[in-house]
Amino acid sequence: MACIKQLLKVKGARVLTVSPETTVYEAIKEMSAKNVGSLLVMTGGSLIGILTERHYARNVILKGRTSPHTLVREVMATNNICVSPGQEIDDCMELMTQHRVRHLPVIEHGKVVGVVSIGDLVKFIIDEQKFTIKQLECYISGERMAH
């Protein structure tokens, strides 16, 4: 089975971060501009949390707070489930399901090297399955597969 390192090669290892002292409004604005659902919360190069659209909905909107007056550190998740680049895709899917999270920071030698979402994992699995199906079709029909 494929591992996270392979997914990051395809997806890219871009990591979007925010400071814990940033307002939630600015963080949500950044998520919207970059079309992402989460930002890693970093201090001095260290991962201290994650802010997702879900945190915004549950910890700002539903609690009657206002995003321009609420800091990221007040609503972020700090019990981060992280994975390594060598972790298998299936294991990551299982972790996300068990812990009900949609984003996993990828850590190698104590440093953040990427982040994967449930959407990234699903897309990777579907692409792998399509490739396998194409290989099998070519094998059955005797065609050579184009690269």
Image: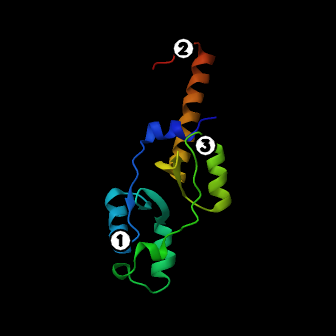
**On-image quarter of the N terminus:** top right
- Please state if 140 lies on the left or on the right of 7 as rendered: right
Looking at the rendered structure, the secondary structure element under dot 1 is loop
- Residue 68 x/y as whole percent: 33, 79
Residue at 65 percent of width and 44 percent of height:
90
Give the camera-side residue of 57 and 21: 21
Under mark 1, the amino acid is Thr
Q: Which residue is mark 2?
A: 143
How far apart are the two marked residues, 2 and 3, measured between alpha carbons? Answer: 30 Å
Q: Earlier in the sequence, mark 2 or mark 3?
A: 3
58 versus 9 height, above or below = below
How far apart are the two marked residues, 1 and 2, measured between alpha carbons? Answer: 56 Å
Residue at 61 percent of width and 42 percent of height:
87
35 versus 29 height, above or below = above
Q: Which residue is mark 1?
A: 22
- Are the two marked residues, 2 and 3, in contact with CB atoms closer than 8 angstroms? no
Give the camera-side residue of 127 and 81: 81
Q: Which mark is residue 89?
A: 3
Under mark 2, the amino acid is Glu
